């Protein structure tokens, strides 16, 4: 991979979008590399959680690559949106927790990438926004759907229709990010949160995420039925037996992760 770095620290995978000279803007190659990377990490039983961040101190991801967008027509415009949507959906549906460490600008496709993650944390200097309308286009990688579901229609429409970014502090206030840290502390803090998740039962994490993600699209009644089914599915697994035994024996659980 040329534009994406993938580092391992124990059961944690750190994925870095690495085009700092273009503020980590997403071209087709970068989207493809991210997609392959997340797919491989999801299949790797030794990976417990994934952190996505951007290279350099300035940007998480400053959007889709505008030099590519500038040349697109109707067909390749739709293809481009589908490519970005396939990546963001893969992240959203990934069996492992995926956390965004937003270390600077998260604009357009960059914010849409972060919106697909399970939790978002920002550096104090970060700016987050969907500026597409100021370029005469609309968000295409899921922003019009995920932002209102996360922050409510009024906040989302204000951000989308003005195109104005919000500061990290404002992002925290509107529920767009879960926490804000000084830039130097961002990655260590996000890794610590991810490692806390990794210390929990891996199958339980996958099913809990599935319950929330799928439940968001269901009625309360159907969501509760899904939750009961998943609760049944985890019952009597070796993981549940180990978790319960560890509690009763006052020891730390030793989870089975495959090879
Ligand atoms: N696509 C392609 N290239 C991008 C880019 C993007 N989304 N965002 C930044 N870049 C490039 C710049 O063109 C510049 O390249 P150059 O050095 O070859 O000219 C380089 O990254 C550095 O960006 P620059 O604009 O010089 O940095 P800045 O600190 O002055 O401004 C931003 C930072 C983020 C405010 C500004 O780059 C910007 O507005 N980018 C576009 C954001 C956007 O609209 N994203 C949504 C796209 S749908």
Image (cartoon, rainbow, N blue to C red):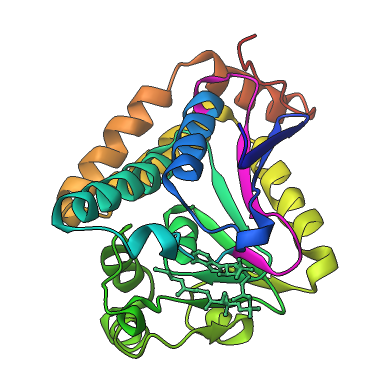
Q: Which residue occupies 27% across, 73% down? A: 137
Please tell me which residue lies in front, 148 or 140: 140
**Which of the pair 155/59 is nearer the observer?**
59
Please indicate, yes or no, whether residue 91 appears anywhere in the rendered image: yes
Q: How many marks?
A: 0
Magenta residue span: 42-60
In which image quadrant can residue 159 be found?
bottom left
Residue 49 percent coordinates (x, y): 61, 38
- Judge left or right: residue 223 versus residue 253: left
Residue placed most toward the observer, 164 or 258: 164
Q: Quadrant of ligand 1?
A: bottom right
Q: Is residue 109 left or right of residue 200?
A: left
Residue lying at 72% horizontally and 26% vertically, measured from the top left:
253
Residue 247 quadrant: top right
* Residue at the front extreme, as displayed: 71
Is residue 44 highlighted in magenta? yes
Say if 50 sits above or below 150 in the image. above
Residue 199 in view, yes or no: no
Q: Classify the position of the C terminus by image quarter.
A: top right
Residue 69, image x, y percentages: 34, 61
Q: Quadrant of the N terminus?
A: top right
Is 74 included in the stretch rendered in magenta? Answer: no
Measured along the vertical axis of the image, is residue 139 above or below residue 153? above
Instruction: Estimate the x, y position of residue 180 in percent, counting from the top left.
Output: 68, 74
């Amino acid at each position: 991979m040329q534009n994406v770095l993938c580092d391992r620290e124990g059961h944690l995978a750190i994925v870095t979008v690495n085009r700092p000279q273009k503020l980590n803007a997403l071209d087709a190659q970068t989207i493809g590399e991210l997609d392959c990377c997340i797919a491989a990490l999801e299949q790797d039983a030794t990976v417990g959680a994934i952190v996505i961040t951007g290279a350099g101190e300035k940007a998480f991801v400053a959007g889709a690559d505008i030099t590519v967008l500038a040349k697109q027509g109707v067909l390749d415009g739709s293809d481009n949106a589908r490519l970005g949507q396939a990546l963001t959906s893969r992240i959203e549906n990934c069996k492992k927790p995926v956390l965004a460490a937003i270390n600077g600008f998260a604009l357009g496709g960059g914010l849409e990438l972060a919106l697909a993650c399970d939790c978002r944390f920002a550096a104090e200097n970060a700016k987050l926004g969907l500026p597409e309308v100021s370029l005469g286009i609309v968000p295409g990688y899921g922003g019009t759907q995920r932002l209102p579901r996360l922050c409510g229609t009024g906040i989302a429409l204000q951000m989308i229709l003005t195109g104005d970014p919000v500061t990290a502090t404002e992002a925290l206030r509107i529920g767009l990010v879960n926490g804000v840290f000084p830039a130097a502390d961002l990655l260590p803090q996000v890794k610590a949160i991810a490692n806390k998740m990794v210390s929990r039962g891996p199958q339980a994490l996958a099913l809990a995420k599935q319950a929330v993600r799928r439940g968001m699209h269901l009625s309360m009644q159907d969501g509760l039925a899904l939750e009961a089914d998943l609760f049944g599915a985890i019952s009597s697994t070796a993981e549940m037996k180990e978790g319960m035994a560890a509690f009763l024996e006052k020891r730390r659980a030793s989870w089975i992760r495959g090879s």
